[in-house]
Amino acid sequence: MPPQLLPSSAAAFSARSAPNIVLNTKVDPFLTGTLKRVARKRPLNSVAQHFRCLTEILSGPSAIWTLCTLFLQRAPQDELIKDDNPLVEAVFNFQMISIEAYVVHVDMVSQNEVAFKLTPETIESLIEYHKDIHTVDAKNDTFNWSEKDGQLKKMHEDFVQAINKFVYRTNSMVLDGLEEDGAGELLCGRSEEVKSAIMGMFLPLLPPPPRPVDIVRPTPVLPSSTGSEHWWQPNLPSTYSNAQDAWKYASSEPVYTSADSGAGMWSTMDLGDFQLPTDLVAEMSPTSTYSDDFVSETPSPTQFYSLPVTTAPMSSMPMPSTLMATSCSPSVGFDTFGGFDWEQYSSNFAPMQYAM
């Protein structure tokens, strides 16, 4: 694509001068018909005559084109008049600004386009509206922050630069709207293009984005040698802890329980001098039922973590006859056992005979 070049008069803050016109070796018929309509007495028999006629028409002081019309506020939003009649509000609160421009470039060879630049009066009106109304509304509609005034100033300066650089470029067929004095209007809906382009320069004031919030997380407590050695163990109730201590030193080997350990004590006692009660004799008789196998109850594995302790079957309990075989005296080692006097009550018991 060839470069799109514009004359120096199209640059920002440049004064108006004669438009730059480039025509082809063969003039387009539509351009010839347009010039005959606006300059009826001018001869148009060559390309040079077309060039001189078009240059004189577009260079005149009255050759101002109306690109579009903007319907804007007269005052900031908080200063507008409030009325029940919308017609009254429209008349007193809004104004129409005509966007006028002049032709700075006509290219009928490569780009086949016409370029327009805004008049100084139009640029001044738009700058005044942006400063006194648009900037004030933008300031009132946003919250305050430290750099708000500086950002408002920069936004206005950017608008001033953009509106002075604005150049509207469109197809050369736009010359169909040319009038006798060099003025003209955009046809075929091109005014909407200009309106959208200019209103797009009124940028909103964007507040700074919210700063990310730093989430302060507590530092995890790592185990160390100074802390508890068993920090990983779950905390159990005191009842479970006591039970666990009671089973902590239980041996994993089978524990054998026998009643023979009490034979030494009973063998030293002589029961020949007293008689046991009848109900006690019935309980100790050989006909009584005893459980041969006895297994100690082990703690639940869900409560304690020690190994289960099992016991071997208890050996047979010695019969009273074996205890009577050895003479024992109630005074041997039990005279003052728990305050019980064996000699006082030995005469109340008569020796009993047991059938074998």
Image: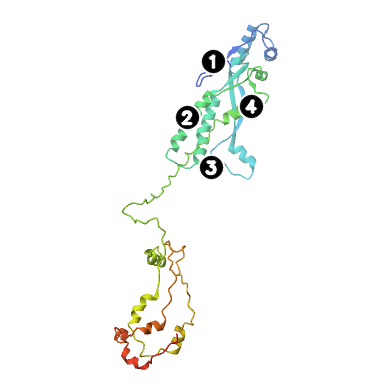
Amino acid type indicated by mark 3: Asp
Q: Amino acid at mark 2?
A: Glu
Depicted 175 relative to depicted 303: above or below? above
Q: For the residues marked 4 and 3, what is the alpha-carbon distance in whole angstroms?
A: 31 Å
- As drawn, is 30 to the left or to the right of 326? right
Q: CA distance from mark 2 to mark 3?
A: 24 Å
Q: CA distance from mark 1 to mark 2?
A: 25 Å
Kindly report the distance in space between the C-alpha atoms of the residues bearing marks 4 and 1.
24 Å
Q: Earlier in the sequence, mark 1 or mark 2?
A: 1
The front one of 320 and 330 is 320
User: What amino acid is labelled 4 in the image?
Assistant: Ser
Check residue 196 in the rendering and tell me which mark sits there, or answer none.
Answer: none
Q: Earlier in the sequence, mark 2 or mark 4?
A: 2
At x 55% / y 26%, what residue is drawn?
122
Which residue is the site of mark 3? 78
Which image quarter: residue 266? Answer: bottom left
Q: Position of residue 189 (x, y in %)?
A: 67, 26
- Let me know if residue 247 appears in the view: yes
Examine the rendering and report whether any part of residue 62 can be seen: no
Task: Give the labeled residue for mark 1.
Answer: 7
Residue annotated with mark 4: 191
Q: How many marks?
A: 4
Q: Secondary structure at mark 4?
A: helix
Q: Nearer the viewer, mark 1 or mark 3?
A: 1
Tell me what residue is drawn at x 58 percent, y 20 percent: 116
Is tag 4's residue or tag 1's residue first in the polypeptide sequence? Answer: 1
